[in-house]
Amino acid sequence: MAKHWLLLTLALGWSSAMSFAGLGSFHDHALANPLLYGRAVPPPLCNSTEISTMNMGSCVCREQQFGCSSPPMNCSVCPNSKGEFLTAFKNVTTCLGGCTDREASCQGCGLWFHSLCDCLKNPQWCNKTSGPIKKDTGPIWVLLSQPGAKENLTTTNERVSGILDTYEKPKFFDEGWEFSQSCYKPQEQALAMNSVRVRTHEQIHTHICKRNDAMYNFLGAENPNHYNSEDLTLVSNYPNNDGKGTDILCLVVKNGDPVKNFASALGQLFAKYPNTCQQRIGQAILQDKYKNTWACATNTTNGPLGLFCGK
């Protein structure tokens, strides 16, 4: 009798073990298949690490986002004589900068989670890059030229918020400005990077825009011999009459050659003038009719786009 109960117990145990094993194998099968109980299982959305490493084979990019999951932020800037203590509203959840995963549903990080992500996933929209789109190969620069966009942009899969980060890694960001110069038409267009105060996206990017003819004519009338190719020098003739403290500081490279040290020059400027309100500083490049390439830092309330980009 005891032997009979032992055999029955072993049989029941084996049956239970097989049942659990069956459940486990069914679970694994469900995870491995896109349909479960007749319903499609959507692939995961690409996270920040997958975008920065270009390891995006199994994820999909987010749709364009509007607003944010929290109210827009008013971020503080350095106090200055113009009474500017806050930035324009930013559709992000933090003022720390940079597009982490907690910003994924925010319009202010749409360039990272939507535009750049789509570009890296669809090389026909990334038809110009500084290196191959290949996972775990290090950061590259890309031209964003998506259909329907008002203007093209350049950016990088290095997760970095903007202009004030560039002079901490001058070599990489000098290369970024060189890449941007290879993407624009210098006799028709200009390049501009917004200041912290006015930018709307928290991933670094350079605008490729129609040039501002007023600035084109003004710089064409300047004597390039009063400047050099290494240091940002105040353009004393610029009409500083808008009541908002607008200054531009430029270096010049002649003969249509590219500027190769723009980020480095900005770092040197900040080191020379440590009390500068850095959140007001933007950058722009424009070539005049004599093929002098002017790379300028702008110190202004509204950023460089209105000065260097036309409508």
Image: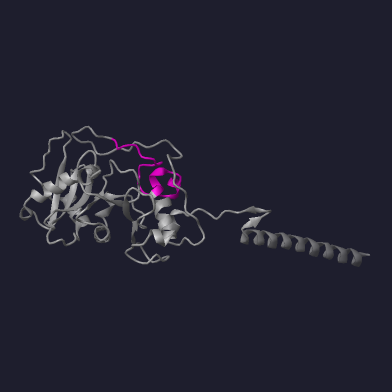
In the picture, which quadrant includes the N terminus? bottom right
**Residue in view at x 26 percent, y 55 percent:** 168
Extreme-right residue of the structure: 1
What percent of the width, then of the height, locates residue 109? Answer: 39, 47
What percent of the width, then of the height, locates residue 236? Answer: 8, 44
Taking the magenta stretch, the answer to whether it contains residue 64 is no
Give above or below for 42 relative to 311.
Answer: below
Q: What segment is highlighted magenta in the picture? A: 86-110
Quarter where residue 55 is shown:
bottom left
What percent of the width, then of the height, locates residue 194? Answer: 27, 46
Predominant SS along the magenta part = loop
The one of 235 and 93 positioned closer to us in this rendering = 235
Taking the magenta stretch, the answer to whether it contains residue 96 is yes
**Residue in view at x 39 percent, y 54 percent:** 116
Q: Can residue 230 be seen in this view?
A: no
Give above or below for 71 relative to 138.
Answer: above
What percent of the width, then of the height, locates residue 256? Answer: 15, 61
Give above or below for 265 relative to 8.
Answer: above
**Residue in view at x 87 percent, y 64 percent:** 8
In the picture, which quadrant includes the C terminus? top left
The one of 150 and 249 positioned closer to us in this rendering = 150
